[in-house]
Image (tube, rainbow, N blue to C red):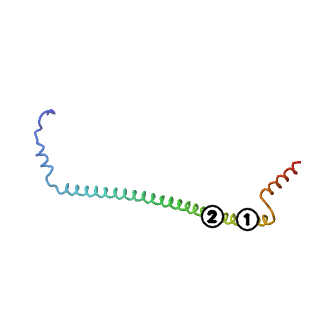
Amino acid sequence: MNLYEKPTWSYHENSRYCAKHDPEVTEDVEKNFAELLKEELQLQEAEALENQRRADLALLEAKKMTSQYQKEADKCNSGMETCEEAREKAEATLAAQKKLTAMWEQRARRRGWKDGVAEVHAQSQGNVQSS
């Protein structure tokens, strides 16, 4: 028979023969199908477990990063509070120093001190030292 000749048996006849009910073949096919389904479900379960593991690792890493950033923020806030306290103390010290300076200036003025006299006195002291 050459390849271009029509076969003597028909496709439909052959398919009807194959489709006949054979209990042994049907049982094997059902077992194989059940095994394939079982394997497919096991693979899907393994994939789901791996995806869950990756998600858990990502979540853990995110929690670590969040904790690290929170620690840094706490340090920053603490530093800001310390700086603010130091600024407030410096302002209070400056205010006290200004009061003290004003008090001494007031006393000096009551005893005759004048701005121009102090400058002349300071210049004359400089001339004496340079000589």
* Disc on res. 87: none
Q: Is residue 40 above or below residue 88?
A: above
Q: Position of residue 59 (x, y in %)?
A: 45, 60
Q: CA distance from mark 1 to mark 2?
A: 30 Å
Q: Residue at x 84, y 51 (%)?
A: 126
How many residues crowd around disc 1 within 10 Å: few (fewer than 14), some, or many (20 or more)?
few
Q: Position of residue 7 (x, y in %)?
A: 12, 38
* Disc on res. 82: 2
Q: Position of residue 13 (x, y in %)?
A: 10, 46
Q: Position of residue 47 (x, y in %)?
A: 37, 56
How many residues crowd around disc 2 within 10 Å: few (fewer than 14), some, or many (20 or more)?
few
Label 1: which residue? Answer: 102
Left or right of residue 63: residue 85? right
Q: Residue at x 72, y 64 (%)?
A: 97
61 or 72: nearer the viewer: 72
69 or 37: nearer the viewer: 69
Disc 1 secondary structure class: helix
Give residue 35's quadrant in the image.
Answer: bottom left
Q: Nearer the viewer, mark 1 or mark 2?
A: 1
Q: Work out whether mark 1 precedes mark 2 in sequence or the reverse, and give the earlier one.
A: 2
Badge count: 2
Q: Name the amino acid, label 1.
A: Ala
Q: Name the amino acid, label 2.
A: Thr
Q: Is residue 46 above or below residue 1?
A: below
Disc 2 secondary structure class: helix
